[in-house]
Image (tube, rainbow, N blue to C red):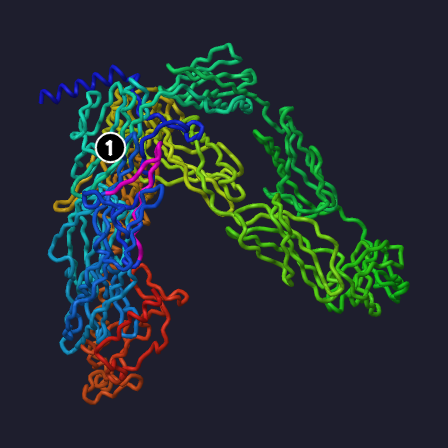
C-alpha cells in the first residue's frame, strides 16, 4: 500500500512539474512534402472483423493492411503460434500487404479454422491486429424423427415444436404447407423465436396434416425441412372459456441478460379462450419510446441500443374477458469493454514527456494489459523512463531511438478491445504549411481568420506581427488559437494590411506573410416599391446598390422566388426591372438579389394587376382568310407564292404567316415557313430538297389570326445531299472504359434524300493517332476500351444516297468516370465560436479525381459533451456539400462544449472517394438552456419557497442562477423588479417579508461564463385564510406514474374562491372542477392551462362546494386528480322571502300529491277486472318445440336451436353438410410476393409465384402423408 501511494505521488509530481512539456498528440500533416523523410512506426489501417464465418465454397480472405515509414513487413500467428505462410502452398500473402488469401478448393476447410493475428513490423516498432476467429459456416441435416399425429379438443392450447439443427450462423425458421404456402400467423397463432409454432387456442380450421417447419441457412443458401406434423381438432368436448396462462416463458418470473449496445428482445406467448391480448410495462419506469418496437402481434418487444438504464423488471400482461395473467422478466445489462478514450499516437521531441491513456469501461470492469511491440510490457526490457499504472503509461525524457508501438488490451468475460498507439521520437525544425502571400478578403463587421498552419518537433510557438512591426497580443480584437490561426472577431478597414506569422522551436524558426483586405458591405440603397398597375400598362421596379469598388456585383431578379419568365416583356437594366404590357399572370412578388464574391443583399416588392379603365367599345374581329393562292417562278430551291387578302374587319392586317405541309415526311402537320408584312401579297419561299410541298396563308390583326386559306397545289423538289449535320453532338462516358456519342438526328425534312446515315469519327485529344470511324443509322454510338475520363475529339457527319453533308465541327467529349482514388489531405478545423467551425483541407490531385470534380462532402458528428456528467448518446451524422474545387467550408449549428469528429470525401459524377482520416475538435462553452423547472411550494402569509432544476443542456460549466421577481396588483400592474443571484449548487430558496394576498411573478435563468440563458417564469399568490391539502395514495395502490399533484391551497372570497396547487405532470389539459356538496349534478369544470392557480367566480353564498384539480390528455387514457377540497362560501344577509317556507305553498303541494295517489289506485283496479286474456297469443308464445317448423332460410329450428354447442365461432363459416372448409383467404406465398422474383425476406418467408388452385374443396385431401421436399424448387428463388 505504501509503495502504491509513493507511485501516485510520483506521477502527480511528474505531471505538475513537466506539464508544460507534456504532449498528448502531435498531428503529422498529410502533406507529402512534410511526410517525406519522417520516420513512422507501423499503424494498422485495415483488418478483418473479430468473428469471420466463411463459406466453404469460396476462398478465405483475411485482411491486414498497415502503413509506416519504412514500409512495414507482415507476419501471422495461428492459435497463438507462428504461422509460416511460405510453407503452405494454399496460402498466399498479397504483395505489399499482410492480407492472406487461402485457397480451400479441394481441401478440408476445417483445417484452416482457428484464431489468427497479424503483426506489422518496421525498425521503429510492431503493430498487431485483433484476434480474428475463423470458422466455417455449417448447415447440418435435420435429425430423422417420426412425428406422431396430434388430436386435440377445440379451444385448448397447442405447441408444434420445430427443433431445427444448429447451424453456423443459426438458420432462419418459417412454417409452410405441402403447397409451399406460408401458414398464416395472427394474434392466436404465432411463431416463437426458437421456431416453435404456438396456438393460444385451436379451432376446427386448424385441422391439417401438413404443418412443416423449414430452416434456411443464409451462408450456404440451403433449406432443410422437418417431417410434416398432422393436427386434428375435435369439437365433441370443446374447452370452455378460461383466463389466460403463459405458454412461454413458464412460471411467474424469468431472467434475461443483454449486453450494452445490443438489442433487447423479450417474448411472451399466452394461451386462453378467448385469445388474450398482450401488453408490456416496465416496473418503476417507462419503455423508451424512440428505441422500442413491438412485433408478432405485441408478443415480442425489442429495445435497441440497450444501456444501463434499461435494466429492471419488465412485466408482460395477458388479458381476456375471463381475467389476466402476469409474467415478470428480470433484465440485467452487462457490457463488453467499450472505449471512453482510446490511446492516441504520440510524436515527441527528445527530452519531452508524454502520456498514453487507455480509458475503457464495461460490466464487469475490464482488465487492462499493456504490450510494447506485441510483447507484454512486464516482459519487455526495463526502461526507467517508462512508468505504468493501470490505464496510464508515462514516458519521461524520451530519447532518440526509443520509438515503439504500444498496445492496450482491455477484456472481461464478454469480449475485449485492443488498440495500437505508437510513440515516435523525432526532432524537426518548424515548417509553415500555409501557402505564402495568401490574400484573405472579408466584409466589414465580419470575423476574419488568418491561418498559420505549422509542423515541427517540439511543437513550434506561433507569434504574429502586423505590417512587420507591430507585435500582436492575444487580446481584443485579436485571438490567437492553439493551431496558430489569428482571428479578428469584428474586422474593420483599419485591420487591412500585411500580417507575418513566425513559427519557432529550439531547432529554428520560419516565417510566412499573408494579407488581409477588409471590404465595404454590399447594400441596396433604393429598394423596389409596391406597385398597382392596370392591365396592359407598364411596371418599373428600381433597385439601386452600393458596393465595394473592388468587388463586381451581379444583380438577379426573381418572381415568387423563381427565375423570371422567358418573355421579352421583361427587361432587366443595370438598376431596374421593366415589365411591358402587364398581364394578370404577372402578379406576384419580385425580388432584387445582389451578389458579390463575399456577400449579398436582397429586397422584394409586390405587383398587383387591376382592370384597365373602360373605354367605348369598338367592334374588332379577326380578318377573313386570304384567297386565290398561286405558285410562280418555280426553281429547285425556291418558288414565289401570291394571294389576295381577305376583309380586315376594322383592324389593319399586321402580317401574313405562310405555312407548309410536307406530304412525304409529315402529312397532316402544318409548319410555319415565313412571315411577310401586312401590305404584301407575295412572298419568295426558300425550299429544301426531297419535299412534297403544299402551302397556305393566315392573316393577323390586333384581334388574332384568321382561318387558314385553302391549300395551294402540290410542289415537289428533287433529292440532294444533306445541307447540315446533326446537332447537339455530345460525348459522355456512362461507365469506366466507354464513351457514348449521341446527337439529335436530322428530320426527314432535313435529310434531303433517301438512305440517311451518320458517319461517327473519334480520336483521343492531344494524342497522335488517326481518326476512328463508324457508319450507323441510329442516333448514338458507344466506343469501348477507353481510358478513364480523358478528352476525345468527336465528329458526326450526315450521309444519304446522294452524298454527304459539309465537314462537321469537332466536339470535345469525355470518356467514363470512375470513383475518386484519393482522400483530401491536411484536414484542419478552426473553431470560430461555440456553434460555428471552419474546416480546411488540401484538395486532391486532379488525376486522382478520375472524373469531373463536383465538390467535397464534409461529414461531421457530435461524439459527446465535455461535461463529465453528461450522458453519451448516439448523435446523427451531418453532411454538408461544398461544390467545386473548394478547400474550406463552414460547419454551422454546432452544440457548444462538445467533441466533434469530421472527415471529408471528394465527389465526382460517379460517386464519392475514400474518406480522409477522422479529425476531432472541441467547441467552447455557450450560454445554457433554460432551467428544467421552477416551482413555488409552501406559500404562507408573507413567504414562499422556490425550487428549480438545473438546465437539461448546460452548454458548459454552470456558473449559477439569476432570479428576478416583482409583485402584480389587482389591475395587473407590475411592481419593481428585485434581482438575486445563486450559486450553481443552489436549487431552492425561501423568500420572506412578502405582501399577503398578492400575486408575484418570478423569472429564473441559468448562466455560464458566456452569459445567461433563456428564462422561465412562474406565478404564485400569497393568500389568507388558506386551507392545505396533500395528494394521498390509497392503501395498497402504487403512486401514479407520470403526472402527480402536490399541495392544494384554497382561499375564500365573498362570491368565490382562489385555488392554487403544485403540479409535476406533462399533461396539457388541466381543469378545476367543482360541485355543490351532496349534489348529484355533473361536475362543472374550468380550463386553467399554463397556470398553477385559478379563481372560481359566481359561487352561491352560504353553500359548500367540493373542489378538485384534474389533468387529462387525449393521448393518455389515464386521468390524474387531487383529493377533493371542501370550500364553504359564507352566507350574506338576504331580504328576499323564501317561498318554500310559506304555509300556503306547503298546503298546495300536499293536495296535488293526494290527487295523484287516488288516480293511480283507480287505474290499478280497472286493469285487474276488465282485461281479456289472449289465449291464441299465449299458445303461440309457448308452442311445443317438437312441432316447431324449420326456418326456410337456414334450416335451423327457430329460437329453440342449440346456440351454445353448435353455433360457429364469430368470423368462421360452416357449410350445410357439416364439414369445415379452409377459409378462402388462406395466406400463400403468392400473396406475400413482390414481383414474383422468388426470394426469402428477412423473416425467412418464401416469396414466389406458384401455379395451382388457391381454393380447395373439402373432399380434396393430401394424397400422401409425406411432404414433397421443396429444397430444389426453392434454391432457384433464394
Image quadrant in which you'd find residue 269: bottom left
* 841 shown above or below 312: above
Q: Along the line of sight, which residue is nearer the eye, 572 or 252? A: 572
Q: Which residue in the protein does label 1 denote?
A: 373
Q: Considering the image in quadrants, where does the C terminus appear?
A: bottom left
Q: Quadrant of residue 1136?
A: top left
1255, 591: nearer the viewer: 1255
Residue 28 place in picture, x, y as percent: 38, 28
Question: Is 369 placed above or below 675 here?
Answer: above
- Decide whether residue 135 is among the magenta residues: no
Q: Is residue 646 above or below residue 571?
A: below
Q: As drawn, is 32 to the left or to the right of 1223?
A: right
The picture quadrant where one finds residue 1214 is bottom left
Q: Which residues are magenta?
A: 58-76
Residue 74 covered by magenta stretch = yes
Residue sitting at x 12%, y 45%? 1035
Depth check: give the residue in front, 199 or 704.
199
Q: Secondary structure at mark 1?
A: loop
Q: Main secondary structure of the magenta part?
A: strand
Q: Would residue 761 be seen by someone viewing this image from the given angle?
A: yes
Looking at the image, residue 956 sits to the left or right of residue 831; the answer is left
Amino acid at each position: 500500500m505504501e509503495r502504491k501511494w509513493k507511485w501516485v505521488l510520483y506521477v502527480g509530481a511528474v505531471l505538475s512539474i513537466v506539464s508544460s512539456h507534456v504532449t498528448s498528440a502531435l498531428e503529422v500533416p498529410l502533406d507529402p512534402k512534410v511526410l517525406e523523410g519522417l520516420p513512422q512506426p507501423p499503424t494498422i489501417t485495415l483488418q478483418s472483423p473479430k468473428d469471420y464465418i466463411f463459406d466453404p465454397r469460396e476462398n478465405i480472405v483475411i485482411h491486414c493492411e498497415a502503413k509506416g515509414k519504412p514500409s512495414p513487413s507482415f507476419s501471422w500467428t495461428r492459435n497463438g503460434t507462428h504461422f509460416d505462410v511460405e510453407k503452405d502452398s494454399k496460402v498466399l500473402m498479397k504483395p505489399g500487404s499482410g492480407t492472406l488469401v487461402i485457397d480451400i478448393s479441394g481441401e478440408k476447410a476445417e483445417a484452416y479454422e482457428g484464431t489468427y493475428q497479424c503483426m506489422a513490423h518496421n525498425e521503429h516498432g510492431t503493430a498487431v491486429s485483433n484476434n480474428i476467429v475463423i470458422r466455417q459456416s455449417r448447415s447440418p441435416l435435420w435429425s430423422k424423427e417420426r412425428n406422431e399425429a396430434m388430436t386435440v379438443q377445440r379451444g385448448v392450447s397447442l405447441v408444434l415444436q420445430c427443433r431445427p439443427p444448429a447451424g453456423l450462423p443459426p438458420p432462419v425458421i418459417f412454417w409452410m404447407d405441402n403447397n409451399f404456402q406460408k401458414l398464416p400467423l395472427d394474434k392466436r397463432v404465432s411463431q416463437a423465436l426458437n421456431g416453435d409454432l404456438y396456438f393460444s387456442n385451436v379451432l376446427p380450421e386448424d385441422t391439417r396434416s401438413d404443418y412443416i417447419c423449414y430452416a434456411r441457412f443464409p451462408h450456404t443458401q440451403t433449406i432443410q425441412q422437418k417431417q410434416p406434423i398432422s393436427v386434428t381438432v375435435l369439437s365433441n368436448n370443446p374447452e370452455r372459456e378460461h383466463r389466460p396462462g403463459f405458454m412461454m416463458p413458464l412460471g411467474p418470473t424469468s431472467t434475461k441478460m443483454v449486453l450494452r449496445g445490443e438489442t433487447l428482445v423479450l417474448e411472451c406467448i399466452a394461451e386462453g379462450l378467448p385469445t388474450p391480448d398482450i401488453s408490456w410495462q416496465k416496473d418503476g419506469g417507462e419503455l423508451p419510446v424512440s428505441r422500442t418496437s413491438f412485433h408478432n402481434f405485441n408478443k415480442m418487444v425489442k429495445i435497441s441500443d440497450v444501456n444501463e438504464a434499461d435494466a429492471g423488471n419488465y412485466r408482460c400482461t395477458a388479458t381476456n374477458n375471463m381475467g389476466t395473467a402476469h409474467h415478470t422478466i428480470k433484465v440485467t445489462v452487462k457490457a463488453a469493454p467499450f472505449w471512453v478514450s482510446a490511446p492516441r499516437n504520440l510524436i515527441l521531441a527528445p527530452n519531452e514527456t508524454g502520456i498514453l491513456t487507455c480509458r475503457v469501461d464495461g460490466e464487469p470492469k475490464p482488465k487492462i494489459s499493456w504490450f510494447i511491440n506485441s510483447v507484454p510490457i512486464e516482459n519487455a526490457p526495463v526502461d526507467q523512463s517508462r512508468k505504468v499504472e493501470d490505464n496510464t503509461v508515462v514516458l519521461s525524457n524520451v530519447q532518440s531511438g526509443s520509438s515503439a508501438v504500444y498496445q492496450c488490451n482491455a477484456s472481461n468475460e464478454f469480449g475485449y478491445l485492443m488498440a495500437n498507439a505508437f510513440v515516435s521520437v523525432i526532432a524537426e525544425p518548424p515548417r509553415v504549411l500555409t501557402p505564402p502571400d495568401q490574400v484573405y478578403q472579408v466584409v466589414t463587421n465580419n470575423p476574419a481568420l488568418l491561418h498559420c498552419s505549422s509542423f515541427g518537433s517540439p511543437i513550434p510557438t506561433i507569434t504574429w506581427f502586423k505590417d512587420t512591426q507591430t507585435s500582436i497580443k492575444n487580446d481584443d480584437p485579436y485571438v490567437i488559437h492553439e493551431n496558430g490561426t489569428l482571428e479578428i472577431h469584428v474586422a474593420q478597414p483599419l485591420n487591412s494590411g500585411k500580417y507575418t506569422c513566425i513559427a519557432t522551436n529550439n531547432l529554428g524558426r520560419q516565417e510566412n506573410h499573408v494579407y488581409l483586405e477588409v471590404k465595404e458591405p454590399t447594400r441596396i440603397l433604393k429598394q423596389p416599391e409596391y406597385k398597382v398597375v392596370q392591365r396592359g400598362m407598364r411596371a418599373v421596379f428600381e433597385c439601386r446598390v452600393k458596393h465595394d469598388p473592388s468587388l463586381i456585383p451581379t444583380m438577379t431578379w426573381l418572381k415568387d422566388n423563381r427565375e423570371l419568365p422567358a418573355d421579352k416583356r421583361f427587361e432587366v437594366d443595370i438598376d431596374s426591372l421593366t415589365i411591358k404590357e402587364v398581364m394578370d399572370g404577372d402578379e406576384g412578388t419580385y425580388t432584387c438579389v445582389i451578389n458579390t464574391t463575399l456577400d449579398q443583399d436582397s429586397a422584394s416588392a409586390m405587383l398587383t394587376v387591376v382592370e384597365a379603365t373602360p373605354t367605348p367599345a369598338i367592334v374588332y374581329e379577326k380578318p377573313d382568310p386570304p384567297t386565290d393562292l398561286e405558285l410562280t417562278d418555280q426553281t429547285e430551291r425556291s418558288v414565289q407564292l401570291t394571294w389576295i387578302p381577305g376583309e380586315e374587319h376594322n383592324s389593319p392586317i399586321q402580317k401574313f404567316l405562310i405555312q407548309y405541309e410536307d406530304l412525304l415526311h409529315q402529312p397532316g402537320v402544318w409548319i410555319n415557313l415565313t412571315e411577310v408584312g401586312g401590305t404584301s401579297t407575295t412572298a419568295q419561299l426558300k425550299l429544301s430538297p426531297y419535299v412534297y410541298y403544299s402551302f397556305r396563308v393566315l392573316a393577323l390583326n390586333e384581334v388574332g389570326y384568321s382561318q387558314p386559306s385553302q391549300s395551294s397545289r402540290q410542289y415537289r423538289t428533287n433529292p440532294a445531299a444533306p445541307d447540315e449535320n446533326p446537332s447537339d453532338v455530345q460525348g459522355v462516358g456512362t461507365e469506366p472504359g466507354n464513351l457514348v456519342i449521341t446527337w439529335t438526328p436530322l428530320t426527314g425534312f432535313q435529310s434531303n434524300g433517301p438512305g440517311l446515315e451518320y458517319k461517327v469519327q473519334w480520336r483521343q485529344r492531344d494524342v497522335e493517332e488517326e481518326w476512328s470511324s463508324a457508319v450507323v443509322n441510329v442516333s448514338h454510338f458507344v466506343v469501348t476500351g477507353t481510358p478513364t475520363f480523358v478528352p476525345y475529339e468527336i465528329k458526326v457527319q450526315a450521309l444519304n444516297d446522294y452524298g454527304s453533308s459539309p465537314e462537321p465541327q469537332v466536339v470535345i467529349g469525355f470518356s467514363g468516370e470512375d470513383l475518386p482514388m484519393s482522400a483530401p489531405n491536411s484536414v484542419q478545423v478552426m473553431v470560430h465560436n461555440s456553434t460555428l467551425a471552419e474546416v480546411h483541407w488540401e484538395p486532391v490531385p486532379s488525376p486522382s479525381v478520375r472524373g469531373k470534380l463536383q465538390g467535397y462532402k464534409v461529414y461531421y458528428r457530435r461524439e459527446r459533451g465535455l461535461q463529465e456528467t453528461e450522458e453519451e448518446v448516439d448523435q446523427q451524422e451531418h453532411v454538408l456539400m461544398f461544390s467545386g474545387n473548394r478547400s474550406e467550408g463552414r460547419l454551422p449549428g454546432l452544440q457548444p462544449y462538445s467533441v466533434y469528429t469530421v472527415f471529408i470525401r471528394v465527389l465526382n459524377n460517379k460517386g464519392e472517394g475514400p474518406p480522409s482520416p477522422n479529425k476531432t475538435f472541441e467547441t467552447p462553452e455557450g450560454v445554457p438552456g433554460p432551467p428544467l423547472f421552477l416551482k413555488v411550494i409552501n406559500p404562507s402569509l408573507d413567504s414562499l419557497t422556490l425550487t428549480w432544476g438545473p438546465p437539461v443542456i448546460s452548454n458548459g460549466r454552470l456558473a449559477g442562477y439569476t432570479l428576478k421577481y416583482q409583485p402584480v396588483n389587482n389591475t395587473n400592474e407590475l411592481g419593481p423588479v428585485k434581482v438575486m443571484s445563486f450559486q450553481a449548487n443552489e436549487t431552492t430558496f425561501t423568500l420572506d417579508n412578502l405582501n399577503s394576498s398578492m400575486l408575484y411573478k418570478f423569472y429564473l435563468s441559468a448562466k455560464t461564463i458566456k452569459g445567461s440563458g433563456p428564462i422561465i417564469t412562474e406565478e404564485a399568490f400569497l393568500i389568507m385564510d388558506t386551507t392545505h391539502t396533500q395528494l394521498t395514495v390509497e392503501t395498497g395502490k402504487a403512486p401514479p406514474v407520470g403526472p402527480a399533484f402536490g399541495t392544494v391551497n384554497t382561499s375564500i372570497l365573498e362570491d368565490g374562491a382562489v385555488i392554487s396547487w403544485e403540479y409535476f405532470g406533462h399533461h396539457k389539459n388541466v381543469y378545476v372542477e367543482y360541485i355543490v356538496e351532496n349534489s348529484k349534478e355533473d361536475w362543472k369544470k374550468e380550463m386553467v392551462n399554463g397556470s398553477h392557480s385559478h379563481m372560481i367566480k359566481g359561487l352561491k353564498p352560504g353553500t359548500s362546494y367540493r373542489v378538485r384539480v384534474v389533468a387529462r390528455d387525449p393521448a393518455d387514457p389515464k386521468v390524474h386528480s387531487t383529493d377533493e377540497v371542501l370550500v364553504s362560501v359564507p352566507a350574506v344577509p338576504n331580504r328576499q322571502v323564501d317561498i318554500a317556507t310559506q304555509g300556503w305553498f306547503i298546503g298546495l303541494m300536499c293536495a296535488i300529491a293526494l290527487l295523484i295517489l287516488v288516480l293511480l289506485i283507480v287505474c290499478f283496479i280497472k286493469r285487474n277486472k276488465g282485461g281479456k286474456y289472449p289465449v291464441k297469443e299465449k299458445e303461440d308464445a309457448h308452442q311445443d318445440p317438437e312441432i316447431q317448423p324449420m326456418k326456410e332460410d337456414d334450416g335451423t329450428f327457430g329460437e329453440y336451436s342449440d346456440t351454445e354447442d353448435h353455433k360457429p365461432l364469430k368470423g368462421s363459416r360452416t357449410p350445410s353438410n357439416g364439414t369445415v372448409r379452409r377459409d378462402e383467404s388462406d395466406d400463400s406465398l403468392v400473396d406475400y410476393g413482390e414481383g414474383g422474383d422468388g426470394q426469402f425476406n428477412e423473416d425467412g418467408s418464401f416469396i414466389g409465384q406458384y401455379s395451382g388452385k388457391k381454393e380447395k374443396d373439402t373432399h380434396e385431401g393430401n394424397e400422401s402423408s409425406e411432404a414433397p421436399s421443396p429444397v430444389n424448387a426453392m434454391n432457384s428463388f433464394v
